[in-house]
């Protein structure tokens, strides 16, 4: 089974692994600078999908113990924090153009 099996993208109900799901990448059109927008995003529950992403990343890309990772557009830092738990010896740099997002991430 490969991307050719999902020509129209993910199908509801089949729950294929992320590694086998074709996803169209869409560039984030905006910096989420408004503190209210950043807070609303931080309060949304992306925990399950974020953890699934981290689990797949870790299982598919074994990293050297002291790897360096950069998360561009980290938002409130849920993913880099989960990544740090999975790779405790990695150096992870989380970057975002939104000061409000970075402030929320620092509180975690
Ligand atoms: C939809 S959020 C995703 C946040 C995080 N990656 C996640 O998955 O939870 C997109 C983030 O990208 C940031 N962003 C958008 N354009 C950016 C740019 N040009 N430079 C840095 N950050 C940017 C936004 O401020 C926002 O925090």
Image: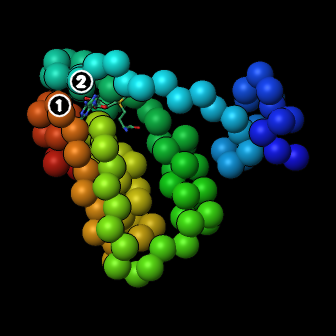
Rendered position, 10 above or below 78: above
Residue 34 sits above or below residue 85 on the image: above
- Of residues 33 and 38, the one drawn nearer to the viewer in this rendering: 33
**Quadrant in the picture for residue 3:** top right
Determine crowd level at label 1: few under 14, some 14-19, many 20+ residues with C-alpha closer than 10 A.
some
Percent of width and height locating residue 84? 36, 64
Label 2 C-beta lies within 8 Å of the nearest ligand 1 atom: yes
**For this view, does 26 lie left or right of residue 40?**
right
Q: CB at mark 1 closer than 8 A to ligand 1?
A: yes
Q: Position of residue 101 (x, y in %)?
A: 20, 34
Whether residues under marks 2 and 1 lie with C-beta atoms below 8 angstroms apart, the answer is yes
Disc on the earlier residue, 2 or 1: 2
- Circle number at residue 98: 1
Task: Give the Cα separation between the discs numbered 2 and 1.
Answer: 6 Å
Residue, disc 2: 31
For disc 2, the neighbor class at 10 Å (few under 14, some 14 to 19, many from 20) is: some
Residue appearing at x 87%, y 46% in the figure: 1
Image quadrant where residue 64 sits: bottom left
Rendered image: mark on residue 14: none
Q: Could you tell me which residue is drawn at 28 percent across and 19 percent down?
A: 30
Q: Secondary structure at mark 2?
A: loop
Work out whether 65 lies above or below 105: below
Q: If the picture is divided into quarters, which one holds ligand 1? A: top left
């Amino acid at each position: 089974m490969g991307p050719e099996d999902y020509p129209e993208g993910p199908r509801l109900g089949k729950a294929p692994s992320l590694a086998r799901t074709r996803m169209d990448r869409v560039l984030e059109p905006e910096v989420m600078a408004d503190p209210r927008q950043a807070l609303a995003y931080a309060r949304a529950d992306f925990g399950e999908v974020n953890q699934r992403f981290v689990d797949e990343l870790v299982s598919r890309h074994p990293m050297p113990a002291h790897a360096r990772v950069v998360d561009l557009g980290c938002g409130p830092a849920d993913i880099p924090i989960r990544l740090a738990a999975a790779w405790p010896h990695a150096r992870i740099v989380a970057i975002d153009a939104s000061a409000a997002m970075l402030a929320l991430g620092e509180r975690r």
